[in-house]
């Protein structure tokens, strides 16, 4: 049984947030008992009449999607700073997963978007949904691992939930810069853990040499037609640079498929 029964979607009526809502509706589908809660955050207090208008507009958008859910997506509003308000709402409403749309920015490595901030600050799994990505079930998932051990096995629960829901194949990917033997020796100690926690959904552990870790990941995504990329942000700072969360930020900026940040 899945542990995911409520999803939070930051929603501002932008193309990226509408795309994320449609992805969530497709993710939940017509038969799963998962609630979708859309959150509109405004900097200033919103009049009741305006709230009603926003809710009506949201309902029209949700009804326009081809796929429907058992329970229609709900819509709420809140005031405050965007990220702080989202995180507060996630705790108050006890949502198990956040889905957030992003326009990304392939032209830079330095941009800080609300999505890239959220995935690093949230204490729950977050899926960033790039605008323009295919709205489809994640049948092939790539979990990126470096030369670190998984300190908290609980973080794999969400990945397993998704794999069970869609009967997905989970590919584990390690990008190495120098010696593959050093990477393999460390990974061997986690292999039984992966097989145990990811069950029969775990299909392979691939190793690829590339001085640019992000480039190696994106190449693998294209080669294997991966539908969803999963990363462990707190364990991956060593892969690309000493700056905390750099790889996570780069992938949320540049990936053309959804990125699941496990936490």
Image (cartoon, rainbow, N blue to C red):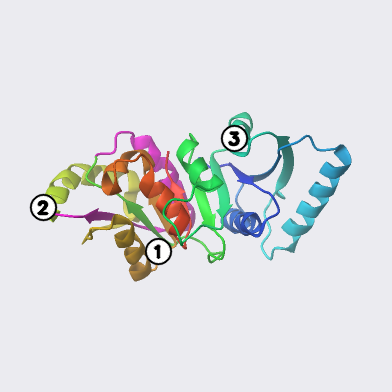
Mark-to-mark CA distance, 2 and 1? 26 Å
Q: Is residue 203 left or right of residue 231?
A: left
Q: Is residue 127 left or right of residue 50?
A: left
Q: Which mark is residue 90?
A: 3
The residue wearing badge 2 is: 181
* Mark sitting earlier along the chain (2/1): 2
The crowd level at tag 2 (other Cα within 10 Å; few <14, some 14-19, many 20+) is few
- Tell me what residue is drawn at x 75 percent, y 36 percent: 44
Mark-to-mark CA distance, 3 and 1? 28 Å
Can residue 1 be seen by looking at this rendering?
Answer: no
- Tell me what residue is drawn at x 73 percent, y 40 percent: 76
Residue 99 lies, in percent from the top left, at: 56, 48
Mark 3 and 2 residues: CB-CB less than 8 Å, in contact?
no
Highlighted magenta segment, given as a residue range = 149-178
Judging depth in this view, the residue of 235 and 72 nearest the camera is 235
Judging depth in this view, the residue of 196 and 91 nearest the camera is 91
- Tell me what residue is drawn at x 51 percent, y 57 percent: 104
* Mark 3: secondary structure: helix
Judging depth in this view, the residue of 43 and 53 nearest the camera is 43
* Mark sitting earlier along the chain (3/2): 3
- Tell me what residue is drawn at x 32 percent, y 52 percent: 144
* Mark 1: secondary structure: loop
Residue 228 lies, in percent from the top left, at: 44, 58
Q: Nearer the viewer, mark 2 or mark 1?
A: 2
Image quarter in which the C terminus is found: top left
The residue wearing badge 1 is: 226
């Amino acid at each position: 049984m899945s542990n995911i029964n409520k999803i939070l979607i930051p929603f501002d009526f932008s193309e990226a947030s509408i795309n994320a809502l449609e992805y969530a509706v497709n993710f939940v589908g017509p038969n799963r008992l998962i609630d979708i809660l859309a959150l509109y955050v405004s900097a200033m207090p919103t009049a009741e009449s305006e709230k009603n208008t926003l809710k009506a507009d949201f309902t029209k958008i949700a009804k326009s999607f081809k796929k429907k859910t058992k329970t229609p997506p709900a819509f709420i509003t809140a005031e405050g700073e965007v990220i702080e308000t989202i995180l507060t709402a996630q705790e108050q409403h006890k949502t198990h997963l956040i889905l957030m749309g992003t326009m990304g920015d392939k032209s830079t490595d330095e941009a800080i978007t609300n999505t890239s901030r959220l995935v690093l600050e949230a204490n729950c799994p977050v899926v960033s949904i790039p605008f323009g990505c295919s709205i489809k079930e994640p049948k092939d998932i790539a979990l990126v691992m470096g030369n670190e051990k998984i300190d908290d096995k609980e973080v794999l629960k969400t990945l397993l939930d998704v794999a069970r829901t869609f009967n997905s194949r989970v590919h584990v990917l390690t990008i190495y810069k120098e010696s593959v033997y050093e990477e393999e020796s460390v990974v061997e100690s986690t292999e039984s853990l992966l097989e145990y926690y990811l069950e029969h959904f775990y299909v392979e552990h691939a190793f690829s040499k590339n001085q640019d870790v992000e480039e190696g990941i994106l190449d693998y995504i294209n080669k294997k037609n991966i539908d969803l990329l999963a990363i462990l942000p707190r364990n991956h700072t060593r892969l690309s640079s000493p700056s905390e969360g750099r790889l996570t930020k780069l992938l949320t900026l540049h990936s053309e498929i959804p990125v699941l940040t496990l936490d």
